Image (cartoon, rainbow, N blue to C red):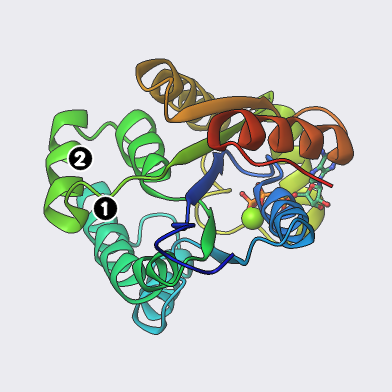
Amino acid sequence: MGNPTLNPGKFITVEGGEGAGKSTQVRLLTEALGRVGIDALATREPGGSPGAEAIRRLLLEGDAERWDATGETLLFFAARRDHVARTIQPALAAGKWVICDRFTDSTIAYQGYGRGLPLDELTALRHFAIGDFRPDLTLILDLPVDQGLARAASRSTADRFERLDRTFHQRLRDGFLAIATAEPERCAVIDGSAEVDAVHRAIISAVAERLGVGSK
Ligand SMILES: Nc1ncnc2c1ncn2[C@@H]1O[C@H](COP(=O)(O)OP(=O)(O)OP(=O)(O)O)[C@@H](O)[C@H]1O
Ligand SMILES: [Mg+2]
């Protein structure tokens, strides 16, 4: 492992709504890959590089109306561009796998399906920010909205996004599923309502099937 010629790194993103279990599963997947000798880097959005972490603070702090949908989207893409250029691509080039907690699909789901920005404009912005760079595999953790919000609520004080109403979170869920339907080769929908271990096993199966690695 680690030779970029023989073992090019893979880029896996983990997506889904609030409390879907993304951070939990990113950690478990990264550890499982390590056990089979794959050098995997866990990272997250917004953030993942010093510049992007600074933008993260602008996005997550303050009241729900701090940014309008367009301004918020531009901040997400500015952060993402920095994260890809300074953290993700260098790691992949070094032969590492990168496991990312949220990526562009979250912008499409939140700002597109959730807040109503035109999907074609978000697609154009994605191209402007990161060109044709895409995940090798996207794991979409799907579960009923109320279950996800209950989990998120039990964990911490709500951030700007968790304070949005329930119908918003339903559009978000529907948006992630629409993305998966539109790009079935890149996306795998995982039942996020199951127990932590069962979700992890489903993820390992999807990674093995789609990217051809086993688990120990
Ligand atoms: N499969 C599961 N079953 C029950 N509880 C879970 C499961 N997965 C995660 N949790 C718990 O639910 C809470 C949210 O999980 P986690 O932080 O992994 O979700 P997340 O998708 O990263 O949330 P957020 O969108 O807020 O970042 C945590 O307290 C976690 O321990
Ligand atoms: Mg999380």
Measuring from the top left, give residue 94's x and y in whole percent: 43, 72
Q: Amino acid at mark 1?
A: Thr
Residue 186 sits in quarter: top left
> How many numbered dots are placed on residues in this image?
2
Q: Is mark 1 within 8 Å of ligand 1?
A: no
Disc 2 or disc 1, which is closer to the eye?
2
**Outermost residue toward the bottom in this view:** 50
Considering the numbered disc 2 on the image, is that residue within a helix, a strand or a loop?
A: helix
Q: Which mark is residue 99?
A: none
Q: Residue at x 33, y 65 (%)?
A: 84
Check whether the beta carbons of the residues at disc 2 and disc 1 lie within 8 A of each other. Answer: yes
Considering the numbered disc 1 on the image, is that residue within a helix, a strand or a loop?
A: helix
Residue 114 sits in quarter: top left
Q: Residue at x 65, y 47 (%)?
A: 22
The correct choice, above or below, for 75 with respect to 58 in the image is above
Q: Residue at x 37, y 68 (%)?
A: 93
Give me the C-alpha separation between circle 2 and circle 1. Answer: 8 Å
Q: Residues within 10 Å of mark 2 (few under 14, many from 20)?
A: many
Q: Residue at x 15, y 30 (%)?
A: 120
Measuring from the top left, give residue 23's x and y in whole percent: 68, 55
The correct choice, above or below, for 22 with respect to 9 in the image is above
Q: Split into 4 quadrants, where in the image is the N terminus?
A: bottom right
What residue sits right under mark 1 in the picture? 73
What residue sits right under mark 2 in the picture? 122
Measuring from the top left, give residue 18's x and y in whole percent: 62, 43
